[in-house]
Amino acid sequence: MRKAVHFKQDPPFDTERWSYGFLVDTIFPRDTWVHRLDISRAIAVEMVVTPEHDGRIVANVVAEWARRHGQRFALTLTGPAGGRWESGDGGESIELDALDFCWTVAGRTPGRGLLTTPVPF
C-alpha cells in the first residue's frame, strides 16, 4: 500500500501539509513564474506575458486565493494575463494589473482587504 508523502511548510503556511503532487504540479511552476516576474522587475525589463501561458497561471492563483479567503468579491485583472472573476454579490471590488495581483498575494508587497490573503508560490 502506498502512503502519501506530505511536507510541512514555513510561515505563513506552517499549519498546512502539502502533498508531493501539489508541490510538483502547482507550487514549483508558480514559484518559477513569480521568480521570472521578480527578475524582470529587478532589471527593469518588461515581462513578456501571454494569455495562453501566463493567463492560466494567474487563473490558478485567483482560484486558490478565492478558496483561501472564502469571501464574496469581484476581481478584475488587467493586462494580457488578466480576466474577471466573481464570487457572490456585494463583496469587495478589486481592479489591478494581473502581475501586480500575483506580486501582492505572493507577499512581495503589502496588500489591503482581501489582498492580504497569501497564496503560496
Image (tube, grey):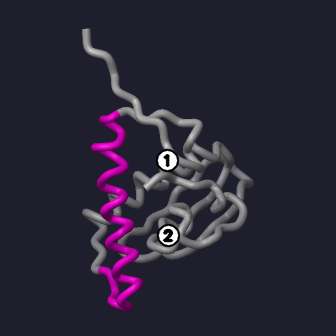
Dividing the picture into quarters, in which one does residue 21 lie? top left
Residue 34 at what x, y percent from top left? 38, 66
**Tag 2 residue:** 103
| Residue type marked 2 | Trp
- Classify the position of the N terminus by image quarter: top left
- Which residue is outermost to the bottom? 44
Residue 61 is a magenta residue: no
Residue 23 at what x, y percent from top left? 34, 43
Which label's residue is closer to the chain start, 1 or 2? Answer: 1
**Tag 1 residue:** 64
- Classify the position of the C terminus by image quarter: bottom left
Residue under the point 35% across and 89% down: 43
Q: Is residue 20 above or below residue 87?
A: above
Residue under the point 50% across and 74% down: 100
Dividing the picture into quarters, in which one does residue 31 lie? bottom left
- Magenta residues span 20-47
| Residue type marked 1 | Glu
Q: Is residue 13 above or below residue 61?
A: above
Q: Is residue 91 above or below residue 93?
A: above
- Secondary structure type for disc 2: helix
- Secondary structure type for disc 1: helix
Q: Is residue 80 left or right of residue 53?
A: right
Q: Is residue 116 left or right of residue 53?
A: right
Residue under the point 37% across and 74% down: 37
